[in-house]
Image (cartoon, rainbow, N blue to C red):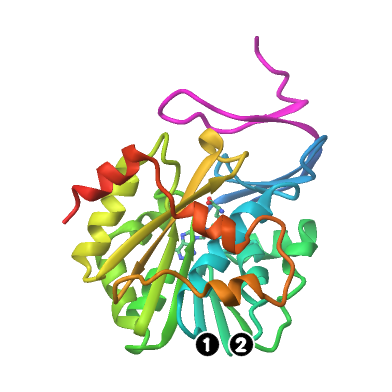
Amino acid sequence: MALDDTLWFTENPTADGSTLSLKVTGKLHEEQTDFQKIEVYGTEGFGNLMVIDGYIMLTARDNYLYHEMMAHPVLFTHPNPKRVLIIGGGDCGTLREVLRHPDLEQVQQVDIDAGVTRASEKFFPELCESNNDARAELHFTDGIKWVKDAAPGSYDVIIVDSTDPVGPAIGLFSEPFFRDCHRALGENGIIVQQSESPLLNMQILTDMHQAMRDAGYADVQTLHFPQPVYPSGWWTCTMAAKHAFKGFRIEDSVCKSFPTRYYSAEVHQGALALPPFMKEAFGKIK
Ligand code: SAM
């Protein structure tokens, strides 16, 4: 049964032949930037929807799941984060979550495409509410070059909130990039990267673990969580650290001074509990 594409947005199908459709109320924006095609739709049940090159980026209804899990686990794992770099993240949802941490001193966001942030300011203003925080800096350039040029030890945490490993983002999943991040991170530095679906993309996940190990990180941990509008509805982020992980600051997480809708210390603990097929796959990586 073909859906009427005047009433439904349907994402580019995955290699496995799966896709997702959302019933739309209208197209609000379309722009071809120097880097990608950005579209925004109104939807019946998920609020506004952002699409880049035919792939769903976020909806107003469920983006909190992803943005909270890209920001809070890594920040409560680092012993005392002060300086954060976000690569990508142009919708500013991750930036908003990061800035909820009162002890941070500087958060730089580097997205290659200013068009994404301009569209988010217009159609997802709630995600951009912290953009004027005195600690925040928004830069629009290639994150790969930014990290390559960064002075050693510049950051405590690097968050890579990128599109899938295609187009301008492909280099963000490579060993040379992870090596450059390793150099740009301080003594207790941690990188976290969105790492796709455990059901559909285990090869991307195992390749990422291997590339992070080869780039010199002492330890790598994947966390999993629901993300309904991403392929399979089951998503991950992967952290890599210069020193072996020793749990996370549970007390600080439990006593956090800000509200979250999905993240909690218990959810954090649970997200680290991997199913056997993932543990087995990661266990083979040296
Ligand atoms: N949560 C989304 C996902 O998982 O697909 C990603 C959100 S965010 C919109 C992805 C961002 O990565 C885009 O704004 C895109 O411009 C940015 N991006 C892609 N390649 C980049 C690069 N080399 N340097 C900086 N930003 C990049």
Crowding at mark 2 (Cα within 10 Å: few <14, some 14-19, many 20+): few
Quarter of the image containing the C terminus?
Answer: bottom left
**Residue carrying label 2:** 103
* Total labels drawn: 2
Label 1: which secondary element: loop
How far across and how far down the image is residue 261, in percent? 72, 57
- Asked if the residues shown at circle 1 and circle 2 are in contact, with their CB atoms under 8 angstroms apart, the answer is yes
| Residue projecting furthest to the left | 286
**For residue 184, above or below residue 162:** below
Residue positioned 47% across, 71% down in the render: 248
Whether residue 86 is visible, yes or no, is no
Q: Magenta residues, as a range?
A: 1-25
73 left or right of 199?
right
Label 2: which secondary element: loop
Instruction: Pick the residue in front: 217 or 58.
Output: 217
Instruction: Pick the residue in front: 31 or 171.
Output: 171
Amino acid under disc 2: Asp
Amino acid under disc 1: Lys
Q: Does the segment drawn in magenta span residue 129?
A: no
Residue positioned 59% across, 33% down in the render: 11
Residue positioned 29% across, 59% down in the render: 174
Instruction: Pick the residue in front: 78 or 196.
Output: 78
Q: Is mark 1 within 8 Å of ligand 1?
A: no
Mark number displayed over residue 82: 1
Quarter of the image containing the N terminus?
Answer: top right
Q: Main secondary structure of the magenta part?
A: loop
Whether residue 138 is visible, yes or no, is yes
**For residue 17, above or below residue 220:** above
